[in-house]
Amino acid sequence: MNDRLKCLICGLEFDFQPNEFFCPTCEQPGLFNKTISGKAQIAQEAGITLEKFASFLPLKKVRAELSLGEGQTPLLALSSLEDGHRLLAKLESVNPTLSFKDRGSVLVVQKALELGWSAVGTVSTGNMASSTAAYAARAGLTCVLLVKKGTSTGALASSAIFNPLIIEVEGDYGQLFRESYELGKEFSIYFANSVDPVRLEGYKLTAFELCLQLGGVPDFVYVPVSSGGHFIGLYKGFLEMKQAGYIKKIPVMVGVQASGCAPIVQAFEEGHKTVSPIRPSGTIAHSISNADPPAGNLVLKLVRDHDGWLTAVTDEEMLQAQKELARSQGLFVQPESAATLAAFFKLRSRFKGMSVLILTGQGLKAVHQPALEGLNYHVSRAGELREFFRSIYRQK
Ligand SMILES: Cc1ncc(COP(=O)(O)O)c(C=O)c1O
Ligand SMILES: [Zn+2]
């Protein structure tokens, strides 16, 4: 029997095929519609994340040997940043290729193999590209990456080492996203982009893990949002945990965008039901700068239906929060991930309770040229250091 998807906006159910998962009416991604029955049990004693939650996944059989050790990420207390209520961070930045994308990629390659596809691909400028390429390499699949023209050498290198076919493409990113599915159908490449429903099944496991680590649910979960895939996956995870009887309520989910590119926040604040593409003013947070988010309407619906929240933070607030996480906690994450702390600072007087920040990616993935600006960084010469130290220590 084919896997079935459901559109949460109009209720339509349809078959899943790689590259074909958008509701024909609502144009939003359908989600796997595996009814959680009494049979769906967490195998607490099982080894890796995928085995633990196997009965919640749309796979005939979990292939543990294709894992790179993703998941089971730490949940750390951020005690010195607390304000009367507990504040914790889920460290997705320690996944094998340093971002949450690995949770999705490990499932994508398994689905590709299960369905007999020999090539996977993705449209990405960063984290998803290296993640997909790494997992494809381990699974012995061909990998095709369509990257935006101008992608930095560093970002390309972290993918290129896995030997995928990389094509730099000029032009509109939204158009490239849609075009990839047409290419995928024609050339039998499973383009598992940001809102692919199989990916989202991997992201939902972060919510499962969080419930187990806490023995319950936090009051608030802060998540950076771009295409909306990760946020929707986490929502699905909490809703399934509730349906399966593991938790009684779901947290207030707080989606965070960069104010220089916040189409979903804009629609939310203006009370719209749908998201319109925007002309962004620009942000340093490239990984969360989708001006035409393919799952924006679904994000809005989930937030409305489940009393979630959406907010935007400025580049300055993100960079300040990034420094704060590093200096007070020893955590180096991307500005995109630090956006969650910036949003927490903005909302904490209203949203009182236990909060969890999802720190989505490692800081090394987004080192910008002026990274040393304003930091305690100096230049000296061998043989002249004594003078240098004297000048510093005398100042104190
Ligand atoms: C570090 C980081 N955080 C957040 C996001 C946003 O995820 P999504 O596009 O699923 O909303 C991305 C996406 O690339 C990312 O790389
Ligand atoms: Zn629909």
Image (cartoon, rainbow, N blue to C red):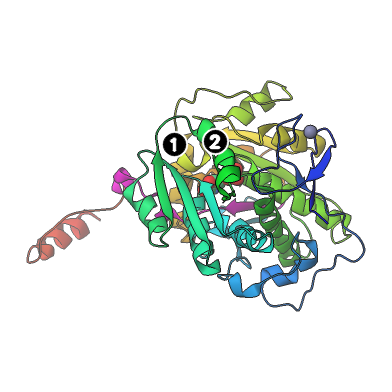
Structural distance between the alpha carbons of marks 1 and 2 = 35 Å
Rendered view: 78 above or below 123: below
Rendered view: 384 above or below 376: below
Q: Residue furthest front?
A: 186
Depth-wise, is mark 1 or mark 2 nearer the camera? 2
Q: Quadrant of residue 296?
A: top right
- Which sits in the foreground, 41 or 72? 41
Q: Where does label 1 land, which residue?
A: 316
Q: Where does label 2 land, which residue?
A: 179
Residue 333 in view of the camera: no
- Which sits in the foreground, 71 or 350? 71
If the image is split into quadrants, where does the N terminus sit?
Answer: bottom right
Q: Position of residue 85 (x, y in %)?
A: 68, 53
Q: Position of residue 70 (x, y in %)?
A: 59, 66
Give the residue type at disc 2.
Answer: Glu
User: From which residue to which does the magenta span run?
Assistant: 354-373
Q: Is residue 141 magenta?
A: no
Residue 240 in view of the camera: yes
Position of 171 with respect to 196 (left or right) is: left
Position of 135 with respect to 275 (left or right) is: left
Dividing the image into four quarters, tell me where ligand 2 lies.
top right
